[in-house]
């Protein structure tokens, strides 16, 4: 008795539906149309060559089993592939694949026409090239080695490294990185992608800005290629979307990204998202998208403290093979505290001016150039910076200054640091004491009075204060 092709395929679908995620079933099996059944050969139509490749790679085993259950061990499967739905005259072509025991369908030779005239329109893929050749769009300079860790970014960096080690297998999915402009969101997200490619070369990694995604989606919509666009993004193993706040007000782009997000998340793929604000503060995005942003870990990047800024500049000069006096590096670090981008920009400006004017980089040159760049705003004098200057002056480690030791020279250095902290910062006495040695406000007040008294009665001590004040660039 002859079986109807619709009945056979529906019976296969009832089994497949129970054995794969619901999103995968909706995405990859609902668009399939059963066309015919001749003897033991079932012909199904799929939307594109990419769609066929994805089915073959991810679902061929369950398709073989269900088809053999319906038609026996000699069952055969044909794919009827629609190459271009935008052309009225476009004709589908057929790929015949055997479904016999022991045959590896993914290695079975098939005859596909060249796709130069009717390419599959995917935003980052060369027509006819498999997904392993997708350009990840990563900047090779944005590595973990070049990302300086500090208190301002420790959580985000640690989470990022964990994700890079086990993409899609940690609780940090999605990993949502947020922070102000120039604090390293793009660098960190790309560092994760680069580390994944180093550890797992077979994985498909893609970095794309939200604006680029929106532009691609608009183009795909205009050309009636939404399915190809959707299927392309759903095959990515690690998807990095930068500046997701740019999705605000773009309802159709949001809807498409929502489906991509769901598919990737439910199939164990990794999502990394960046924004200029935490999920709870995002506006213009649907509640269902914001709720998914909260599924994993939200980690913020804060403005770097003085020590981190100093480390960033030292690494930058080391990597570029540049030698600068410590006093110059310290001046830049103390003058610019807003973000890393401006910090590096100041260094580049200083180097460029030095080269063009053929001048040696000195502290005076640095002051002249940096002060112009920061528009003569008074640079930030921080508690960390004051401790660093005092310790350098007395040739001791900051850890010693903050220790419990009662040695006279250490106590005196600690008191001087407290003195300048009270004079040059807006920090409370309690804050100064807690940062410098874990002391209380009374200790700080006593230190301030002691330094004042010694400056008036001891010439040598007064010269200490004058020298340190000069190093702190107080005018």
Image (tube, rainbow, N blue to C red):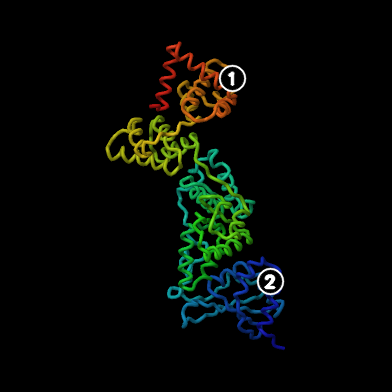
Q: Is residue 443 left or right of residue 473?
A: right
Residue in the picture at 52% in, 50% down = 189
Residue 85 is tagged as none
Mark 2, mark 1: which one is toward the viewer?
1
> Tag 2's secondary structure?
helix
Q: Percent position (x, y) of residue 247?
A: 51, 59
How far apart are labels 2 and 1 at the CA level? Answer: 71 Å
Asked whether disc 2 touches disc 1, contact meaning CB atoms under 8 Å apart, the reply is: no
> Tag 1's secondary structure?
loop
Q: Is residue 381 left or right of residue 440?
A: left
Q: Nearer the viewer, residue 79 or 39?
A: 79
Residue in the picture at 53% in, 19% down = 447
Residue in the picture at 46% in, 71% down = 222
Residue corresponding to mark 1: 405
Q: Is residue 349 above or below residue 325?
A: below
Residue corresponding to mark 2: 16
């Amino acid at each position: 008795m002859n079986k109807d092709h619709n009945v056979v395929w529906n019976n296969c679908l009832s089994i497949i539906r129970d054995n794969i995620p619901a999103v995968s079933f909706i995405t990859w099996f609902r668009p399939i149309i059963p066309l015919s059944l001749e003897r033991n050969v079932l012909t199904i139509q799929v939307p594109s060559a990419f769609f066929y490749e994805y089915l073959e790679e991810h679902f061929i085993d369950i398709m073989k089993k269900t088809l053999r259950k319906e038609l026996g061990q000699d069952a055969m499967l044909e794919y009827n592939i629609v190459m271009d739905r935008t052309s009225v005259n476009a004709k589908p072509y057929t790929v015949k694949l055997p479904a016999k025991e022991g045959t590896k369908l993914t290695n079975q030779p098939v005859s596909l026409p060249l796709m130069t005239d009717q390419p599959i329109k995917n935003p980052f893929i060369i027509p006819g090239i498999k997904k392993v050749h997708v350009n990840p769009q990563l900047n090779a300079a944005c590595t973990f080695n070049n990302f300086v860790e500090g208190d301002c970014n420790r959580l985000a960096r640690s989470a990022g490294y964990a994700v890079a080690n086990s993409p899609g297998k940690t609780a940090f999915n999605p990993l949502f990185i947020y922070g102000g402009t120039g604090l390293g969101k793009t660098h960190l997200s790309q560092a994760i992608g680069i580390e994944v490619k180093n550890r797992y070369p077979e994985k498909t990694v893609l970095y794309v800005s939200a604006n680029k995604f929106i532009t691609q989606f608009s183009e795909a919509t205009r050309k009636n290629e939404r399915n190809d666009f959707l299927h392309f993004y759903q095959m990515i193993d690690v998807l990095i979307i930068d500046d997701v706040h740019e999705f605000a007000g773009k309802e159709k782009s949001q809807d498409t990204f929502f489906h991509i997000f769901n598919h990737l998340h439910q199939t164990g793929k990794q999502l990394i998202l960046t924004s200029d604000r935490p999920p709870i503060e995002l506006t213009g995005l649907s509640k269902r998208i914001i709720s998914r942003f909260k599924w994993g870990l939200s980690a913020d990047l804060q403005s770097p403290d003085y020590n981190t800024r100093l480390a960033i500049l030292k690494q930058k000069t080391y990597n570029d093979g540049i030698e600068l006096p410590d006093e110059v590096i310290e001046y830049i670090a103390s003058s610019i505290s807003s973000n890393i981008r401006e910090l590096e920009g100041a260094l580049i400006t200083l180097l460029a001016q030095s080269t063009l004017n053929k001048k040696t980089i000195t502290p005076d040159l640095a002051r002249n150039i940096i002060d112009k760049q920061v528009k003569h705003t008074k640079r930030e004098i921080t508690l960390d910076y004051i401790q660093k200057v005092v310790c350098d002056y007395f040739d001791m480690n900051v850890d010693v200054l903050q220790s419990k030791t009662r040695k006279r020279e250490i106590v005196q250095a600690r008191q001087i640091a407290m003195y300048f902290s009270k004079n040059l910062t807006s920090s409370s006495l309690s804050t100064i004491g807690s940062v410098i040695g874990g002391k209380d406000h009374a200790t700080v007040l006593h230190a301030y009075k002691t330094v004042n008294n010694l400056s008036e009665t001891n010439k040598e001590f007064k010269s200490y204060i004058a020298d340190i004040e000069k190093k702190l660039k107080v005018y």
